[in-house]
Amino acid sequence: MKDKLKNDLIEAYLYEYQFADWDLINEDILKDPDTPSLILDMLYDANKADMRVLRGISVHPKASPELLKILSADENDAVRWGVAENNNTPDDALLKLSKDSSDVIRYRVAHNPHAPEAVLAGLSKEESKIVRSGVALNAHTEHGILEHFANDKEEIVRLAVAENNSTSADILTVLSDDIDRNVRAAVAENKNTSEQTLTKLAGDRRTVVRDKTSRNPNTPIAALQGLINDGEIVVREGVARNESSTVEILNVLANDQKQSVRSGVARNKNSSEDILRKLSDDGDAYVRKAVARNKNTPETVLTRLSKDDDWRVCEGVATNPSSPAAVLEFLSNDRDRYVRKAVASNVSTPDDVLIRLAEDDEWIVRENVANNPKAPIEALMKMKDDDDWRVARLIVKNPNMTEEALHRISLSHGFRMRYKACVALLKHEEDL
């Protein structure tokens, strides 16, 4: 079965893409993360002189280690950049690229999560601050190297250490006293920063530092309470959006004069039903839209907001997976295509509604049905011959497409759809 699929895939590729223009190759092959490595190999063989194709292959997640090793010696910097950052690049190619004359390429090797420890250790001693910053950002860089970099003379290197999600709390504590506000802000944003350090940063004189602190879910409640009266809007907005903010904090911010702060409260999963009911009557449409999108908003409120005068609020209800089926059916007939588009993408939309929307006049609505992981096979098959390629190409990727349906498409449609169906079938076999 797999060999036959490969033969069918190759036949469709040769017929449709062997002499295709760049736009078609880029859209259907290079931008598709599921393109099999055998197709990339064939594309390389036919386009060895086309830098655009080689660049696209170099960054593709299915590019084979063997092909990437070949491309690592390409004369074009952009191609080698792609190889340097590709997760499939073999160790020997990364070692070679770690000695490349280009700082940017060595930086990309340093940032590659699969770079060997020995390569990272070597690059950590580079004179180039760009390369050192790449090592400092790498999640697999040794603790000792990060500790050393925390005192680096270059701000860009210290900033990278502060941004690294693997940096330990003790190193972050050191960096919380950094002279540069951007470094301190990165510490405030890091999930590994200790509560004690976050409490200290909540009192930083720089707005950007307090802003990042207000948004960190690990910031202590007492520190968040101290920020609800901050003079800067972005800081109060950060507290309003923080997933650790309590109902008591959100109750206070629900009365804030600024729309962005109230919207943050309306969006917060911790907001009580009483808060959401109150904000559903807010005079600002963006606040009501945030309420409409909140999964915890009561059904009675969602039903009322589905008839709001502002289409953006209706779209918010149509997006919400907690919206009742009757409300989604009502909104599926809305005159605004963006409201219907939201209904089409909602995983809670009833099957009969999705089947009807699969024949909507607007391609953007049909596209969202095709992309909906809950779309029934009947809705998907209605779009297999869709006049808009943006719609048709998506149905073969939908998880609800059956093997039988994909086989039918691979045998009876144009070569472009046949190619896409074969790619989907091969991916299905690999996933088994």
Image (tube, rainbow, N blue to C red):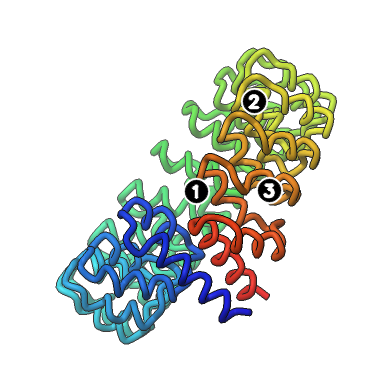
Residue identified by numbered label 2: 289
Task: Report whether 127 appears left or right of 330.
Answer: left
Judged from this view, the residue extending furthest toward the front is: 412
Measured in 3D between alpha carbons, the distance from the residue under mark 2 to the one under mark 1, in whole angstroms, is 35 Å
Asked where in the image residue 227 lies, by quadrant, the reply is top right
Residue at the spot 41% in from the left edge and 53% down from the top edge: 27
Q: Is the residue 280 above or below the residue 418 in the image?
A: above
Q: Position of residue 67 (x, y in %)?
A: 34, 79
Measured in 3D between alpha carbons, the distance from the residue under mark 2 to the one under mark 3, in whole angstroms, is 30 Å
Q: Is the residue 339 above or below the residue 372 in the image?
A: above
Seen from the viewer's position, the closer of residues 343 and 40 is 40
**Quarter of the figure that contains the N terminus:** bottom right
Residue at the spot 61% in from the left edge and 56% down from the top edge: 396
Indicate the secondary structure of the residue bearing disc 3.
helix
**Circles 2, 3 touching at the beta carbon (< 8 Å):** no
Residue flagged by tag 2: what amino acid is it? Lys
Q: Given this view, does label 3 or label 1 mark the residue nearer the observer?
A: 3
Seen from the viewer's position, the closer of residues 241 and 213 is 241
Residue identified by numbered label 1: 200
Viewer can see residue 162: no
Task: Report whether 404 appears left or right of 102.
Answer: right
Seen from the viewer's position, the closer of residues 202 and 33 is 33
Residue flagged by tag 1: what amino acid is it? Lys
**Circles 3, 1 touching at the beta carbon (< 8 Å):** no
Residue identified by numbered label 3: 380
Indicate the secondary structure of the residue bearing disc 1.
helix
Seen from the viewer's position, the closer of residues 9 and 148 is 9
Viewer can see residue 241: yes
Residue flagged by tag 3: what amino acid is it? Leu
Mark found first going from the N terminus, 3 or 1: 1
Q: Is the residue 356 above or below the residue 59 in the image?
A: above
